[in-house]
Structure formats: structure tokens, C-alpha cells
Image (spheres, rainbow, N blue to C red):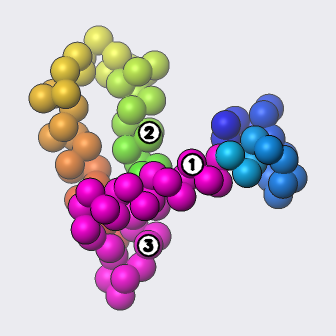
Amino acid sequence: MWRPELRTVGDDSPVDEAGLTSYQVLIDESLQATGRRGRGGDLAPVALGVVAVHGLATLVVDGPLRDQVLTWSQAEPMVDAVLDLAIRV
């Protein structure tokens, strides 16, 4: 939904609205699951973590990690590391 051919920045289209809504769900669920925020209660690290985990998922599903990460037990340490780095920002 964030691909440029599907949307125009700030166009307030249904695709844009759905993207922003789903992004907020990811942030809310991440906060609930981890109970963590950045320094001073900042949500930016959580948002960064969500985007970083999405990037990792893309590498696993469609990219160079596709044939290397086949189980959750292989992926979980990478997800934890990405979230830890993002939340430390």
C-alpha cells in the first residue's frame, strides 16, 4: 500500500487512509506486545522498529533471505535484534 504507483503522498485516498490506519495498528500492537517506548515516551522508535521489521519480513518473503529463513525460530532472533536496535534510538 506504500508503493508509489498505488498512492500519491498526501492524497487522502482510501489507499492512503488504509495505510495510515494499518500503520497505527502495528504501532499499537508493538507497544502492547513489548510495553516499550523510546526515551521520554517517544513513539518514533516504535514506528522505526515496525518499519524495520517490515523490511526484514520483505527480505525473508521476497528477497535474499527467502531460502535461508524458513522457520520462526530462525526469524525470531533477527526480529528481536531489529526491535532492540530501533527502540534504543
Q: Is residue 12 left or right of residue 1?
A: right
Of 82 and 18, the residue lying toward us: 18
Examine the image and state in which quarter residue 85 appears: bottom left
What is the C-alpha distance between the residues marked 2 and 3?
Answer: 18 Å
What is the C-alpha distance between the residues marked 1 and 2?
Answer: 16 Å
Asked if residue 48 can be seen in this view, the reply is no
Query: Is-magenta flag for residue 27?
Result: yes
Image location of residue 51, percent across then percent down: 46, 50
- Magenta range: 19-47
Q: Amino acid at mark 1?
A: Ser
Residue 22's mark? 1
Q: Is residue 83 above or below residue 31?
A: above
Image location of residue 84, percent across then percent down: 23, 59
Q: Which residue is mark 3?
A: 43
User: In what element is the residue under mark 2?
Assistant: helix
What is the C-alpha distance between the residues marked 1 and 3?
Answer: 16 Å
Q: Residue sitting at 19 percent across and 28 percent down?
A: 72
Q: Which residue is mark 2?
A: 55
Q: Amino acid at mark 3?
A: Leu
Q: Is residue 51 left or right of residue 75?
A: right
Q: Is residue 23 above or below residue 69?
A: below
Circles 2 and 3: CB distance less than 8 Å?
no
Image location of residue 79, percent across then percent down: 25, 43
User: In what element is the residue under mark 3?
Assistant: loop
Q: Amino acid at mark 2?
A: Gly
- 2 vs 3, front mark: 3
